[in-house]
Image (cartoon, helix red, strand yellow):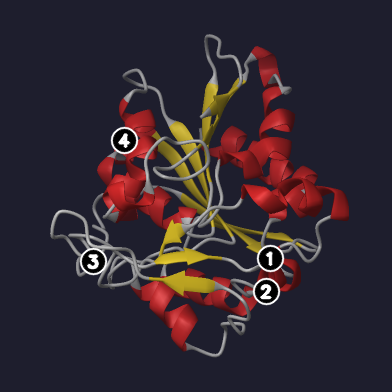
Amino acid sequence: MATSSSSTGARHIFLVHGVCHGGWCWYKVAARLGSLSPAGRSYHVGALDLAAAGVDGHRLHEVPTFRDYTAPLLDALRSLPDGEKAVLVGHSLGGLSVALAAEEFPGKVAAAVFLCAFMPDCMSPPSHVLEELHAGRYWESQLDNETKPQDAAHGKLLPASFKFGPQFTELNIYQRCSKEVTSRLRNLSCESAQRSSRTYGSSSHTPRIASRYGSVRKVYIVCKQDRTIPEEFQRWMVSNNPVDEVMEIDGADHMAMLSTPDDVVRCIVDIVEKYN
């Protein structure tokens, strides 16, 4: 977990990565936020590594459920001092981690922000948004993405592992990022567990709780050139789960924090100042 220095009156921001990535993908945004000191306060920024991602020490087979995977975010919220709140920014699959954290600790979340992220509603199981994207007209060809089974551990069935292929990454994930960025980060992606209604964990058939997750203020940031979670699907999720505010970034691909970091920072700063 990379953090900037904290001080009295800090505004807490937790940045949550998506599948096959780690906290490293937020380096441009985290650096910009960490250098800001609005109204004499600082932003305390955490670019989290979820379990078995980034530099986290867990192996993929040690993270069988989505709650296990999200544990670093849950621990970060749990450790906040009484009376302090954080703005959670989830990207891609990180939106489901943010939703779980908001349900667990609604009193510690100033706002849940979904940056071209999967956003569950309070009517369907969390995995519903994943299955709707993959089954519908929104999903691009898998191209060279790789899915393979994991060996069972201690008699427990494990979710399949998943990794984006170089061709899919170039065409559909990083297509608007600079060559400098893509060449620098090409080897940092990792395998992740493939999540579905069967592998989401014990809560796979339970919608998020309206009195908890539903009570947290939410902002959706639409990335208009996203080919992985297309704009039409992002807006479909918002129509199913109305939010307090919708923002847009024109020119952002799926990795908006790398292709349009200044725009992402402007959105986060506005949200932190408005909802914290």
For marks 3 and 4, the one nearer the N-term is 4
**Res. 268 image quadrant:** top right
Q: Amino acid at mark 4?
A: Gly
Foreground tag (1 vs 3): 1
- Tell me what residue is drawn at x 28 percent, y 66 percent: 199
Distance of label 4 from label 1 (alpha carbons): 34 Å
Foreground tag (2 vs 4): 2
Foreground tag (2 vs 1): 1
Residue 135 in percent (x, y) is at 45, 87
The one nearer the camera, 34 or 10, is: 34
For marks 3 and 2, the one nearer the N-term is 3
Residue ID for mark 1: 173
The secondary structure type at the circle numbered 3 is: loop
For marks 1 and 3, the one nearer the N-term is 1
Residue 238 in percent (x, y) is at 50, 69
Distance of label 2 from label 1 (alpha carbons): 7 Å
The answer to whether mark 3 and mark 2 are in CB contact below 8 A is no
Q: Is residue 102 visible?
A: no
Residue ID for mark 4: 107
Residue ID for mark 3: 204
The secondary structure type at the circle numbered 4 is: helix
Q: Amino acid at mark 3?
A: Ser
